[in-house]
Amino acid sequence: KQEVTQIPAALSVPEGENLVLNCSFTDSAIYNLQWFRQDPGKGLTSLLLIQSSQREQTSGRLNASLDKSSGRSTLYIAASQPGDSATYLCAVRWDNQGGKLIFGQGTELSVKP
Amino acid sequence: NAGVTQTPKFRVLKTGQSMTLLCAQDMNHEYMYWYRQDPGMGLRLIHYSVGEGTTAKGEVPDGYNVSRLKKQNFLLGLESAAPSQTSVYFCASSYGIGVMQYFGPGTRLTVT
């Protein structure tokens, strides 16, 4: 079964720290992987999309990497800020037809001032 | 450019009632999706559409119907609401398959 797992479920760090969020997936034959941010009571904001042929994508202080062979992706956040506090979701697309995304449960990040 | 919008934002239904959730996007996207988000279950795909006039089932389609009569709109219907359908519903759209999906703000539905 195609599944996406994010560990830990929650993470608390002091402001200024660099941190890594983890995403693992079964079945390495993915089409692409997307990272989202969700603020409490809000919708999802797309952060980064990595195609299966890519190793990493960067946007500002965010860097997402992909290692298909090990079934892992990481989201690196540099110099964390209290405004980064949110739940981060990883989602994988395995098919190239309907574009169905399978989501992980998310990591709830809290950055303390 | 409003992006993806959802109507209504909140709704309370009694068991057996029906309702329609409306999703609209102004980005000229071909693909549209309906997800539900539940504690401990994450986001799961209900139905999706790859273009005007087309719909397809996702992971959890039972109890829901959809229609895509216009490219910019994707409707999700509950014919006879059940307490198990209490959830937050998100609509999303994308230009194609290999690109980002953009999400609406969600509809919080409670069925009593």
Image (cartoon, rainbow, N blue to C red):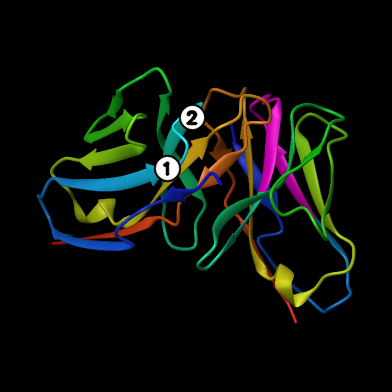
Q: Earlier in the sequence, mark 2 or mark 1?
A: 1
B30 drawn magenta: yes
Decide if residue B12 is on the left or right side of residue B102.
Answer: right
- The one nearer the camera, A22 or B97, is A22
Residue positioned most to the top? A53
Region of the chain picked out in magenta, as a range: B21-34
The three-letter code of the residue at mark 2 reads: Ile
Cβ atoms at labels 2 and 1 below 8 Å apart: yes
Task: Assess whether residue A99 is covered by the magenta stretch.
Answer: no
The correct choice, above or below, for A10 with respect to B33 in the image is below
Which residue type carries mark 1? Phe
Q: Front-most of A56 and A109? A: A56
User: Which residue is drawn at the image coordinates 42% and 42% (left, top)?
Assistant: A25
At 29% from the left edge and 57% from the top edge, which residue is drawn?
A85
Please rate how many residues cluster around mark 2, counting C-alpha atoms within 10 Å: few if below 14, some from 14 to 19, many from 20: some
- In the picture of the structure, the residue carrying the numbered disc 2 is A30
In the picture of the structure, the residue carrying the numbered disc 1 is A25
Q: Quadrant of residue B28?
A: top right
Is the C terminus of chain A in the top left, top right, bottom left or bottom right quadrant? bottom left
What residue is at 78 percent from the left and 38 percent from the top?
B73
